[in-house]
Image: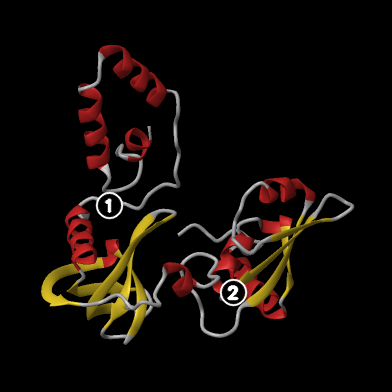
């Protein structure tokens, strides 16, 4: 069932081989069992977030997967959103990670001299090298990401965040495990206080803004300031008077 759903073109990028393998196994089953398996697979649908446009990047995925499995370094040319330019680095790829909409690789970058996250879709050129590496014994994806809201742990201590969600969206928020540290506190008026510990405020700020006037950051003050700044910039984009036609 999972191979059918996640290996489809609308499923998990670069996993069509899983669906093909499942179909091959099904074709060798006795007729009655094959019919049952097909009916079972057709009875479930899995809808993921919309995936990034991956056309033309499957060879990058395959090469990176081989490098991770064989513990071999690669040389990259990469369109960086942090440096706002194209960079070149030698990467020791520790693990591949699919998160929400895209594939990423996490490993030690020679340019940055630390472990970094790279989007496979922003790799311009990949050159496999014969040089091998060892994944540090202390490395784990959990230790690297710490308590990041999504993918980008920020320097400094973790922050305690409290967000108030109004009654209209409170139940919707409460039904989802958004973060491993979250704690819910219901208020008498039906609103919800959402408590969470995060390694950085930038990512969670975008999430809060997605709820518009139904969410208010209570703590910490720095998060309130960050949201106030972003809301002010949004207000500038939507002035009271409609812009004149050009």
Question: Label 2 vs label 1: CA separation?
Answer: 29 Å
Q: Nearer the viewer, residue 240 or 2?
A: 2
Q: Residue at x 20, y 53 (%)?
A: 58
Q: Nearer the viewer, residue 117 or 19?
A: 19
Mark 2, other Cα within 10 Å: few <14 / some 14–19 / many ≥20: many
Picture coordinates of residue 227, whole percent (x, y): 65, 71
Q: Tag 2's secondary structure? A: loop
Q: Earlier in the sequence, mark 2 or mark 1?
A: 1
Residue 72, horizontal then vertical, whole percent: 18, 72
Q: Report the front residue among 228 and 203.
A: 203
- Judged from this view, the residue extending furthest toward the right is 188
Quarter of the figure with residue 199: bottom right
Query: Taking 20 as reference, is 52 left or right?
Result: right
Q: Quadrant of the C terminus?
A: bottom left
Q: Quadrant of the N terminus?
A: top left
Residue for badge 2: 201
Q: Is residue 167 above or below residue 151?
A: above
The residue shown at (20%, 74%) is 77
* Residue at image location 47% in from the left, 73% down from the top: 143
Which is nearer the eye, 21 or 197? 21
Q: Classify 10 Å Cα crowding around label 1: few (below 14), some (14-19), many (20 and above).
A: some
Is residue 82 placed above or below 54 in the rendered structure? below
In this image, 133 relative to 244: left or right? left
Say which mark, if any, is on residue 54: 1
SS class of the residue under badge 1?
loop
Question: Is residue 165 found left or right of 156 in the rendered image?
Answer: right
Image coloring type:
secondary structure
Residue 166 picture location, percent across and down = 77, 53
Q: Residue at x 21, y 77 (%)?
A: 133
Q: Contact, CB < 8 Å: mark 2 with mark 1?
A: no
Is 206 situated left or right of 17 in this image? right
């Amino acid at each position: 069932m999972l191979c059918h759903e996640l290996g489809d073109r609308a499923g998990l990028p670069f996993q069509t081989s899983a669906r093909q393998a499942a179909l091959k196994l099904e074709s060798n089953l006795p007729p009655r069992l094959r019919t049952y398996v097909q009916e079972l697979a057709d009875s479930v649908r899995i809808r993921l977030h919309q995936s990034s446009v991956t056309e033309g990047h499957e060879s990058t995925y395959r090469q990176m997967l081989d490098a991770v499995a064989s513990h071999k370094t690669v040389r990259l040319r990469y369109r960086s959103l942090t440096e706002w330019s194209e960079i070149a680095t030698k990467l020791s790829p520790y693990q591949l990670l699919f998160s929400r909409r895209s594939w990423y690789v996490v490993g030690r970058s020679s340019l940055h001299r630390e472990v970094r996250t790279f989007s496979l879709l922003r790799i311009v050129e990949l050159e496999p090298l014969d040089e091998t590496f060892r994944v540090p014994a202390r490395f784990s994806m959990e230790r690297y990401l710490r308590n990041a809201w999504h993918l980008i742990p920020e320097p400094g201590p973790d922050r305690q965040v409290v967000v108030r969600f109004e009654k209209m969206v409170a139940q919707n928020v409460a039904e989802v495990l958004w973060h491993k540290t979250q704690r819910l506190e219901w208020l008498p008026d039906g609103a919800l206080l959402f408590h969470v510990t995060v390694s950085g405020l930038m990512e969670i700020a975008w999430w809060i803004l997605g709820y518009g006037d139904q969410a208010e950051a209570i703590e910490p003050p720095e998060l309130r300031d960050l949201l106030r700044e972003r809301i002010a910039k949004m207000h500038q984009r939507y002035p009271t008077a409609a812009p004149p036609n050009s």
